[in-house]
Image (cartoon, helix red, strand yellow):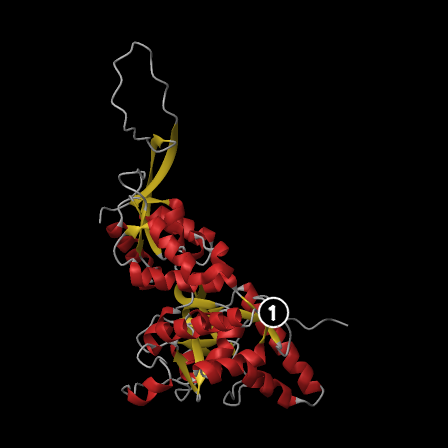
């Protein structure tokens, strides 16, 4: 039998004037497309089994797969459950016609393909860092400072979890990380950020309780400790629970019966607090470290190390100068969370603060503006230039002895090492 020939032309019909919808094409990254297809597969399976309510329950529990978060004036950001993406508009060289088939279009009476939109651009999803700094600015005025302060302080605007998720431009999983880093707890249906002073008192009470009962930091009874903190120190249960299971400890089982204290988190918090209190101006590093060790106690003193608080301080003298007995090492509080999130402004502030940086000192201040090493290296190439210099491998030794008489014997050559310094590509 002769086969039917395909039509040589397609009849295009313009949509009616009542169809005023505007369409945009969204290009999905491979990892997002995989999530969308997996969700569609689960929904299809649930419908086949007659369990449509399973998909609704999953949606309610985990949230929508793709959401656009932020305020009206923010840069457009689309979030999955695990990552944050900026939306970029890309102009297409070829025009695309979005059409609907006649069999699926009730308004088409001519049998032609209906042209819905003429598209000349496409939306692209570009991975970006989550905008977690807004958590601090959003919840600062309503921070929790204890039950007594609740009765006397001026009532500030409170935010529900739904409102915070809507305003903060970040994915669901990244938001939880940000809430923990800002020490946010759910109190009476609202997210409240625990003030640094109250948190210090709560942590100090916990450490004193652990020492008093000679608990092992790796196995602390949860229920008994919660009851003691509430009865003896009036620490609210929600705050104490977050203190032990999220911020400064980890459950050893589910449901949690015992917790292990997180030594790094405790040392980091107390170090940052001590910097904020004692090192607003440069102070001697050795003396400051002694205070840090005393503040964490004997149990955690061995964990004290400057690497725990990278991105929170500057050391002096400024490179390439080296410390001497007359000019010993000093430390100053310089937290990265007070710097702008925009990369150009971040580099400008960094190079205004210090004209030359060692790479190891600079990198901690770029962790929250670059999604990966490739992006970070691109930012360094764009905003910084390198300069290699040679300096003595060891700081000069200052002698109190009088200078010896000149000798014809040639002195031993000083061993040198090479340093790479980063400075602003454009003079600030």
Question: Vertically, is 207 above or below 237?
Answer: above
Across and down, in percent, residue 287 comes to 34, 51
How many numbered dots are placed on residues in this image? 1
The residue that appears at 48% across and 80% down in the rendered structure is 229
Is residue 257 rendered to the left or right of residue 353? right
* Quadrant in which the N terminus is drawn: bottom right
Q: Quadrant of residue 423?
A: top left
Q: What residue do we see at 56% from left, 85% from top?
A: 104
Q: Is residue 47 in view?
A: yes
Question: Residue visible at 30% across and 38% down?
Answer: 325
**In this picture, is 52 found above or below 196?**
below
The part of the image, by quadrant, that contains residue 7 is bottom right
Tell me the residue at 56%/83% (across/down). 61
SS type, badge 1:
loop
Could you tell me if residue 311 is visible in this image?
no
In the depicted view, which residue is nearer to us: 68 or 364?
364
Which residue has dot 1 on it?
219
Q: Please state the horizontal and vertical placement of residue 334, each as a whole percent of the image.
A: 31, 57
Picture coordinates of residue 422 (x, y %)?
Answer: 33, 43
Q: Nearer the viewer, residue 92 or 146?
A: 146
**Going by the image, does 428 lie left or right of 43?**
left
Q: Is residue 97 left or right of residue 138?
A: right
Percent coordinates x, y for residue 156 in the rendering: 30, 85
Residue at the far left: name it: 428
Front residue of this view, candidates 182 and 287: 287
Q: Is residue 349 above or below residue 206?
A: above
215 shown above or below 22: above
Q: Quadrant of residue 250?
A: bottom right
User: How many residues crowd mark 1 within 10 Å: few (<14), some (14–19), many (20+)?
Assistant: some
């Amino acid at each position: 039998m002769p086969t039917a020939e395909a039509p040589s032309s397609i009849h295009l019909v313009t949509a009616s004037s009542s169809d005023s919808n505007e369409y945009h094409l969204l290009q999905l990254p491979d990892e997002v497309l995989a999530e969308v297809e997996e969700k569609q597969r689960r929904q299809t399976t649930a419908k086949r089994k007659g369990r449509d309510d399973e998909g609704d329950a999953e949606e309610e529990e985990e949230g929508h797969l793709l959401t656009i978060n932020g305020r009206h004036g923010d840069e457009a950001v689309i979030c999955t459950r695990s990552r944050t993406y900026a939306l970029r508009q890309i102009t297409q060289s070829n025009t695309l016609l979005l059409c609907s088939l006649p069999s699926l279009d009730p308004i088409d009476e001519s049998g032609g393909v209906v042209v819905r939109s003429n598209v000349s651009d496409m939306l692209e999803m570009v991975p970006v860092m989550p905008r977690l700094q807004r958590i601090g600015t959003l919840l600062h005025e309503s921070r929790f400072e204890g039950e007594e302060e609740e009765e006397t302080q001026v009532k500030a605007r409170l935010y529900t979890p739904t409102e915070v998720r809507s305003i903060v431009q970040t994915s669901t999983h990244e938001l939880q990380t940000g809430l923990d880093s800002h020490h946010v707890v759910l109190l009476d249906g609202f997210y409240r950020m625990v003030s640094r002073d109250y948190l210090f008192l709560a942590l100090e009470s916990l450490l004193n309780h652990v020492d008093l009962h000679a608990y092992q930091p790796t196995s602390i009874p949860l229920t008994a400790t919660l009851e003691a903190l509430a009865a003896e120190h009036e620490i609210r249960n929600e705050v104490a629970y977050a203190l032990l299971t999220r911020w400064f400890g980890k459950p050893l089982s589910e449901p949690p019966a015992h917790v292990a204290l997180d030594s790094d988190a405790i040392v980091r918090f107390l170090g940052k607090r001590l910097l904020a209190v004692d090192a607003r101006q440069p102070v001697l590093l050795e003396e400051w470290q002694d205070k840090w060790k005393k503040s964490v106690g004997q149990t955690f003193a061995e964990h004290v190390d400057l690497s725990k608080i990278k991105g929170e301080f500057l050391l002096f003298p400024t490179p390439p100068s080296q410390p001497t007995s007359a000019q010993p090492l000093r430390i100053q509080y310089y937290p990265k969370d007070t710097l702008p999130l925009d990369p150009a402004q971040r580099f400008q502030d960094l190079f205004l603060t210090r004209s030359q940086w060692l790479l190891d000192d600079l990198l901690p201040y770029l962790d929250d503006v670059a999604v990966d090493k490739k992006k970070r290296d691109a930012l360094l190439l764009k905003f910084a230039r390198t300069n290699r210099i040679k300096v003595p491998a060891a700081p000069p030794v200052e002698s109190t002895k009088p200078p010896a008489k000149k000798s014809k014997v040639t002195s031993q050559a000083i061993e040198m090492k090479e340093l790479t310094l980063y400075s602003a590509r454009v003079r600030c």
